[in-house]
Image (spheres, rainbow, N blue to C red):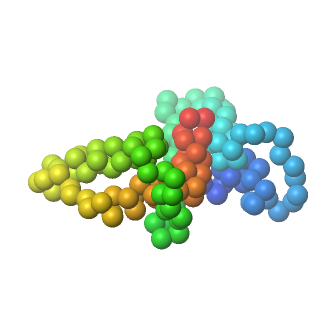
Amino acid sequence: MVQYSYSANAQEGGDPGKLKLDIPRFTDIRPHGFGSWMGNLLLHKYASMYGTDMLFMSLDHFTSPELDKVNPSLEGKLGSHDYEVAKAKIAHAAKSLAPILGKVAEIDEKTLNAYIGYMLSPEYQSYRADFLAAKVR
């Protein structure tokens, strides 16, 4: 198993905030996604070199932003498509907890909107884009 961290993928992908030298990037691929793609190439090289039957890549330290460190504003988002999708995802998560809790989790409107705001925040959306870029590569 080969493990890649969020930070390592960013550095490998040329994230200007992670490099010690001022090296220009010539790609519009997100640094985390590009770093993951490079890691995937390395995995294929290891598999070829060592004739492995199985080789796994795990993503470590891909932690979503803390709830209290995002801007969860819903200004201009209430009723939007993104708002409705986030609301449906939360409702689905609440229903999926029923077997564990013995009932569907109840969420008051204030808490629901706080989580929707979190899911729609720029901080969470940036993290999500990095994670999906790493996952897809």
**Would residue 8 appear left or right of 114 to someone viewing this image?**
right
**Would residue 21 appear left or right of 68 to someone viewing this image?**
right
Q: Position of residue 88 (x, y in %)?
A: 33, 43
Q: Is residue 127 above or below residue 55?
A: below
> In the image as oriented, which residue stretches furthest toward the left?
102
**Would residue 63 appear left or right of 94 to someone viewing this image?**
right
Q: Residue at x 51, y 39 (%)?
A: 56
Q: Quadrant of residue 8?
A: bottom right
**Would residue 76 appear left or right of 106 to someone viewing this image?**
right
Q: Residue at x 25, y 59 (%)?
A: 107
- Considering the image in quadrants, where does the C terminus appear? top right
**Residue 42 visible at all:** no
Q: Is residue 45 above or below residue 65?
A: above
- Pick whichever, 81 or 12, lies toward us: 81
- Pick whichever, 29 or 37, lies toward us: 29
Q: Position of residue 61 (x, y in %)?
A: 53, 58
Q: Position of residue 132 (x, y in %)?
A: 55, 41
Q: Position of residue 112 (x, y in %)?
A: 33, 58
